[in-house]
Image: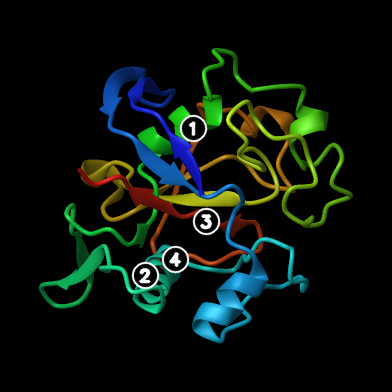
């Protein structure tokens, strides 16, 4: 886990032409997306289409990712961040919990940028696996150069689930995805690009990365 300092990030949405600033407290973010080896150790499951311990886990839904966070927290003696709510079709985030969780999309973009102000934190071929260099397949984590804060694969390889609902009025419960994947063109692999999908959606270029709150 990488310690991310407090700061501010401005998010934007091309569809609505809206921008908004978010203040962030310090938090921790995993150096890499969750690997297949770690996912199997915690859950006993092997959902991915491509197989390899160092490959990012994929074919996981938003719900799968949230359940993994709670399971890893319990395994390490931490308080789970997520609690079932109502009829079990939604969950609450316990802000006082010290366990693992998904990053918010503001946390994700702030960490991806790592103090840079361009669309990417470096030359795309040096930092990301995307359609132009991936040979249309998944690659092991950490194979490309990290961003200035030491985070790898923030762009390319697999899209990453975030905590946030994308736009409840238009898309209901759809959740935010960030980062671009191994099959995407270069324009999708930028720090500001937002994608959305239903929380039950599973596909071979979507995974996730875990975060933890820094509690005072």
Q: Are marks 3 and 2 in contact (CB under 8 Å)?
A: no
Q: Return the disc, 2 or 4, that comes first in the chain's sequence.
A: 4
> Which of 131 and 25 lies nearest the eye of the viewer?
25
Q: Which mark is residue 111?
A: 1
Q: Is residue 163 visible?
A: no
Q: Earlier in the sequence, mark 2 or mark 1?
A: 2
Tell me, for residue 65, which label it has, or none: 4
Is 131 situated left or right of 25 in this image?
right
The local secondary structure at tag 4 comes to helix
Q: Earlier in the sequence, mark 4 or mark 3?
A: 4
Question: Which of marks 4 and 1 precedes in the sequence?
Answer: 4
Residue pointed to by mark 2: 73
**Among numbered discs 3 and 2, the one appearing first in the sequence:** 2
**Nearest to viewer (mark 1 / mark 4):** 1
CA–CA distance between discs 1 and 4?
19 Å
Q: Residue furthest front?
A: 216
Q: Nearer the viewer, residue 90 or 152?
A: 152
Tell which tag, 3 or 2, sits nearer the viewer: 2
For label 1, the crowd category at 10 Å Cα-Cα, with few meaning under 14, some 14 to 19 and many 20 or more, is many
């Amino acid at each position: 886990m990488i310690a991310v300092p407090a700061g501010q990030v401005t998010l934007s949405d091309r569809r609505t032409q809206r921008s908004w600033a978010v203040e962030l407290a310090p938090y921790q973010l995993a150096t890499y997306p969750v690997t297949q080896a770690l996912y199997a150790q915690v859950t006993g499951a092997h959902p991915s289409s491509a197989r390899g311990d160092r490959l990012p886990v994929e074919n996981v839904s938003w719900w799968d990712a949230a359940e993994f966070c709670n399971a890893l927290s319990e395994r390490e003696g931490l308080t789970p961040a997520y609690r079932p709510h109502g009829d079990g079709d939604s969950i609450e985030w316990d802000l006082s919990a010290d366990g693992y969780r998904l990053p918010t999309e503001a946390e994700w973009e702030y960490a991806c940028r790592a103090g840079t102000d361009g669309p990417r934190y470096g030359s795309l071929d040096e930092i990301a696996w995307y359609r132009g260099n991936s040979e249309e397949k998944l690659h092991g984590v950490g194979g490309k150069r990290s961003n200035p804060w030491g985070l790898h694969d923030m762009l390319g390889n697999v899209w990453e689930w975030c905590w946030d609902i994308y736009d409840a009025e238009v898309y209901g419960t759809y959740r935010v995805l960030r980062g671009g994947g191994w099959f995407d063109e270069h324009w999708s692999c930028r720090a500001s690009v937002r994608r959305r999908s239903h929380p039950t959606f599973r596909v071979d270029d979507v995974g996730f990365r875990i975060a933890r709150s820094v509690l005072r």
